């Protein structure tokens, strides 16, 4: 007599195993249901060849996945390859969890093993004048792109976070306006119990708040706060821009004399974090206001922290060769 588990397996076998392409699509749907951006899955999928996308997951082998991984090194930095590998492995793990016939986890744990020594970050940090020029050039190019860029520059948020702002997230206080920024789906951005995206407060200038309030006037509270000139929302990919407006951002970057292959919208976030560090804002506060962790800031921006601490330490140096301070002791008259 067969047990219930065997009957369930037989029922599962009535359907064909999912392909890698379907697994990526289901992972995208899972991300969206958890409040994450769909681009986290669609961007890596766009780099997978049809030969892999159409292959059933149980038939994937480590050699073909490793060949794809290594081939990506000719197109992007090792850190980016690792990021895509993590996404694809997450999609495959989700597929394996849903279908017990998939038992070749070793194929992707081995074939998509993370590249060593790929943690070196190459974050572009802009000076304050460059950030100002970036925002002004964005407004000159397109008013709505200017608003989106202005929010990123002032809040230090990820583009995917700003794209998910609603009209109700604008707190247009007269002297202390702020945005209730949705947390990133990375980490603790989603309350697992209520499945509600958590938010945190970020300060913006009264001028920006007034501009956003004027643009949102008459729109429902549940409408997106930041929209493009064509009325569509700001879809973003792993680099913080969509193919729909990638050229616009590139033109803005070139207009201020920078290289669009190096400078993206993410440069505004990196610059905001470093600016806060160099202004003596405690790392814990910087982490909280940028929806990241102290450990991640120390790992990613360590050289700027070292520079910052060096400036502080220098104040405590005693130079024995310096001219002695004037004697400010005044003798008491007899």
Image (cartoon, rainbow, N blue to C red):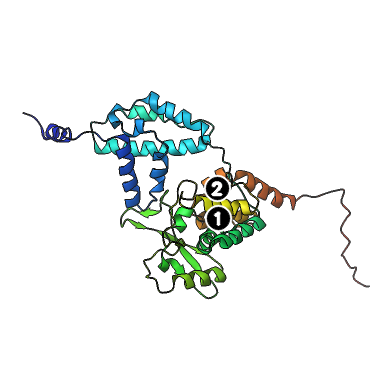
Measure the C-alpha gap from mark 1 to mark 2: 9 Å
**Front-lying residue, 94 or 289:** 94
Question: Do the CB atoms of the residues marked 1 and 2 lie less than 8 Å apart?
Answer: yes
- Crowd around label 1: few <14 · some 14–19 · many ≥20 (10 Å): many
SS label for mark 1: helix
Query: Which label is found at residue 286?
Result: 1
- Crowd around label 2: few <14 · some 14–19 · many ≥20 (10 Å): many
| Horizontal relation, residue 220 to residue 152: left or right | left
Residue that lies at the very extreme toward the top in this rendered image: 63
Relative to 321, residue 182 above or below? below
Where is residue 32 shown, x and y percent of the image? 34, 51
Query: Which label is found at residue 122?
Result: none
Q: Which residue is mark 2?
A: 297
Instruction: Check the picture and name the quadrant holding the N terminus.
Output: top left
Residue at point 87% right, 51% down? 322
SS label for mark 2: helix
Residue 133 occupies quadrant: bottom right
**Front-lying residue, 19 or 113:** 19
């Amino acid at each position: 007599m067969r047990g219930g588990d065997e009957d369930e397996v037989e029922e599962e076998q009535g359907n064909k195993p999912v392909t890698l392409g379907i697994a990526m699509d289901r992972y995208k749907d899972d991300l969206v249901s958890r409040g994450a951006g769909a681009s986290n899955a669609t961007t890596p999928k766009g780099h997978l060849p049809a030969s892999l996308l159409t292959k059933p997951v149980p038939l994937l082998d480590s050699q073909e996945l490793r060949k794809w991984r290594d081939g990506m090194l000719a197109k992007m930095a090792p850190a980016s390859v690792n990021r895509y590998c993590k996404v694809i492995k997450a999609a495959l793990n989700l597929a394996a969890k849903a279908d017990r016939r998939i038992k070749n986890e070793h194929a992707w744990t081995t074939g998509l093993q993370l590249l060593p020594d790929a943690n070196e970050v190459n974050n572009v940090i802009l000076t304050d004048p460059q950030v100002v020029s970036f925002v002004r050039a964005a407004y000159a190019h397109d008013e709505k792109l200017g608003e989106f860029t202005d929010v990123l520059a002032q809040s230090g948020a990820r583009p995917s976070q700003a794209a998910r702002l609603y009209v109700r997230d604008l707190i247009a206080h007269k002297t202390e306006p702020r945005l209730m920024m949705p947390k990133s789906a990375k980490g603790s951005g989603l309350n697992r119990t209520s499945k509600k995206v958590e938010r945190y407060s970020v300060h913006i200038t009264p001028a920006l708040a007034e501009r956003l309030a004027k643009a949102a006037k008459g729109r429902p509270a549940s409408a997106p706060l930041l929209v493009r000139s064509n009325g569509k929302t700001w879809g973003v990919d792993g680099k913080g821009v969509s193919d729909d407006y990638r050229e616009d951002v590139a033109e803005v970057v070139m207009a201020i004399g920078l290289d669009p292959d190096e400078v993206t919208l993410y440069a505004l976030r990196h610059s905001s974090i470093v600016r806060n560090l160099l202004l003596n804002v405690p790392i814990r506060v910087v982490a909280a206001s940028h929806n990241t962790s102290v450990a991640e800031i120390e790992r990613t921006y360590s050289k700027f922290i070292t520079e910052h601490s060096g400036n502080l330490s220098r104040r405590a140096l005693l130079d024995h060769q310096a001219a002695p301070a004037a004697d400010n002791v005044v003798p008491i008259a007899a």
